[in-house]
């Protein structure tokens, strides 16, 4: 008997820790076409389900500061800080036109300069 080809990419199991920023999709709302199925959250707690033994997570939905319990990690994706800060890290500081920078980069520069520092931090 021929083996069926795998149709979905297998992703490595990820373990989340308190404070991690994640994107979560409520799969039932998603498949039913309901709004509000995807949101950004912060991991607050991890626990093991008594019956299944699977690790589940409690999140705080950031847009409404709402506690959401029992989240299946298969429907969560880590939002790495490097992705959130990429526009600032790669801002074309040598460009004379600030229009070439994203609004986040300009806001960060303005905030940094408003704090009285005339020197930018060293690039990492």
Image (cartoon, rainbow, N blue to C red):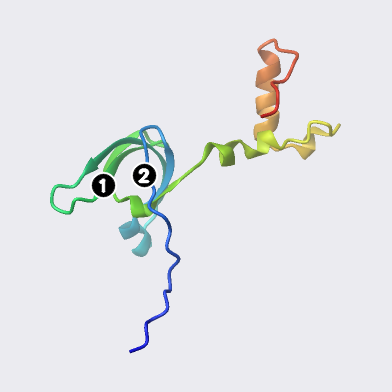
Name of the residue lying farthest toward the bottom: 1
Total labels drawn: 2
Q: Quadrant of residue 93?
A: top right
Question: Callout 1 environment at 10 Å: few (<14), some (14 to 19), or many (20+)?
Answer: some
From this viewpoint, is residue 70 visible? no
* Tag 1–tag 2 contact (CB < 8 Å): yes
Please tell me the numbered disc located at residue 29: none
- In the image, 63 versus 54, the foreground residue is 54
Q: Secondary structure at mark 2?
A: loop
* Residue projecting furthest to the right: 96
Q: Residue at x 64, y 39 (%)?
A: 86
Quadrant the N terminus occupies: bottom left
Closest to the observer, 48 or 70:
48
Disc 1 on helix, strand or loop? strand
Quadrant of the image occupied by residue 82: top right
**Image quadrant in which the C terminus is located:** top right
Residue 96 at x, y percent in the picture: 86, 31
Residue farthest left in this picture: 51
72 lies left or right of 40: left
Q: Which mark is residue 55?
A: 1
Q: Is residue 88 visible?
A: yes
Q: Position of residue 38 (x, y in %)?
A: 41, 50
Q: Residue at x 37, y 41 (%)?
A: 16
Residue situated furthest top in the rendering: 116
Q: Residue 83 occupies which quadrant of the picture?
A: top right
Crowd around label 2: few <14 · some 14–19 · many ≥20 (10 Å): few
Vertical placement of residue 90 versus 75, above or below = above
Q: Position of residue 24 (x, y in %)?
A: 39, 48
Q: Disc 2 marks which residue? A: 15
Say whether disc 1 or disc 2 marks the residue closer to the N-terminus: 2
Looking at this view, is 47 or 105 the one in front? 47
| Relative horizontal placement of residue 31, taking residue 119 as reference (left or right) | left
């Amino acid at each position: 008997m021929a083996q069926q080809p795998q149709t979905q990419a297998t992703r490595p199991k990820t373990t989340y820790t308190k404070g991690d920023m994640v994107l979560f999709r409520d799969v039932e709302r998603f498949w039913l076409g309901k709004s509000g199925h995807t949101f950004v959250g912060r991991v607050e707690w991890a626990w093991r389900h008594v019956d299944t033994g699977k690790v589940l997570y409690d999140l705080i939905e950031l847009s409404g500061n709402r506690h959401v319990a029992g989240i299946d990690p298969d429907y969560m994706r880590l939002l790495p800080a490097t992705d959130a800060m990429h526009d600032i890290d790669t801002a074309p500081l040598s460009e004379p036109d600030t229009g070439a920078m994203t609004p986040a980069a300009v806001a960060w520069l303005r905030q940094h300069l408003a704090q009285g520092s005339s020197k930018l931090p060293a690039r990492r």
